[in-house]
Amino acid sequence: MTTIIKNRQAVADDYTLLTLAEGDAADTVALPAGPLLVPLAVWQARQAELQSRGTLVGVWLAAGEGPEAIAGDLAALPVVGVHFPKFVDGRGYSTARLLRERYAYQGEIRALGDVLHDQLFLMARCGFDAFALKEGKDVAKAVAAFETFKNPYQAAVDQPQPLFRRRAA
């Protein structure tokens, strides 16, 4: 079983991440048993089937897919994954902020793909609360990354007041 970081702790991942291989079709790909994290295309093609399975189902968004595609379904989704194809691709940060701020999503937002420990603090500030690190990375070292900064200056999802307002209060 894979280990992820959730709420700043290393935990076992209950979800199976479903990906579409070359030639796989969203409407015919085999669905493994148990909790699933499926690509947006599979969710859109098989939503009724996925919801009737009786197991947890989440959706993951590719870098070019925005949260507006699942806005109406967020209440039914316990987890939304956001895929980072490369660590330098920052679109996922905006996706997490939109999910939290515009759509008031309260479920788990999980960073997937090329996720490195030095990104975790900023990802958490944008609304991520779970992280599937890039394969081969040290989870224990990554958990320690959350303690790098104690008092961020800027306002963000995790702290809506900037430091100068917190100090004035």
Image (tube, rainbow, N blue to C red):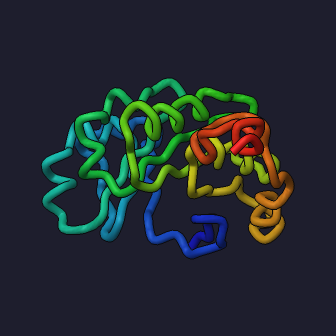
- Image coordinates of residue 98 in percent, x first then y, are 47, 31
* Quarter of the rendering containing residue 84: top right
Quarter of the picture containing the N terminus is: bottom right
Q: Residue at x 43, y 27 (%)?
A: 66
* Quarter of the rendering containing residue 3: bottom right
Q: Residue at x 30, y 44 (%)?
A: 74
Q: For this rendering, which residue is in front, 39 or 89?
A: 89
Instruction: Give the total number of marks visible in the rendering.
Output: 0
Q: Residue at x 75, y 67 (%)?
A: 139
- Image coordinates of residue 15 in percent, x first then y, are 44, 65
Question: Which residue ends up furthest to the front in the rendered image?
Answer: 169
Q: Residue at x 61, y 34 (%)?
A: 93
- Image coordinates of residue 92 in percent, x first then y, are 58, 34
Vertical placement of residue 91 versus 61, above or below: above
Q: For this rendering, which residue is in front, 111 or 126?
A: 126
Is residue 44 toward the left or the right of residue 35 in the image? left
Is residue 149 toward the left or the right of residue 93 in the image? right
Quarter of the picture containing the C terminus is: top right
* Quarter of the rendering containing residue 37: bottom left
Is residue 71 toward the left or the right of residue 102 in the image? left
Is residue 163 toward the left or the right of residue 156 in the image? right
Q: For this rendering, which residue is in front, 50 or 163?
A: 163
- Image coordinates of residue 162 in percent, x first then y, are 70, 36
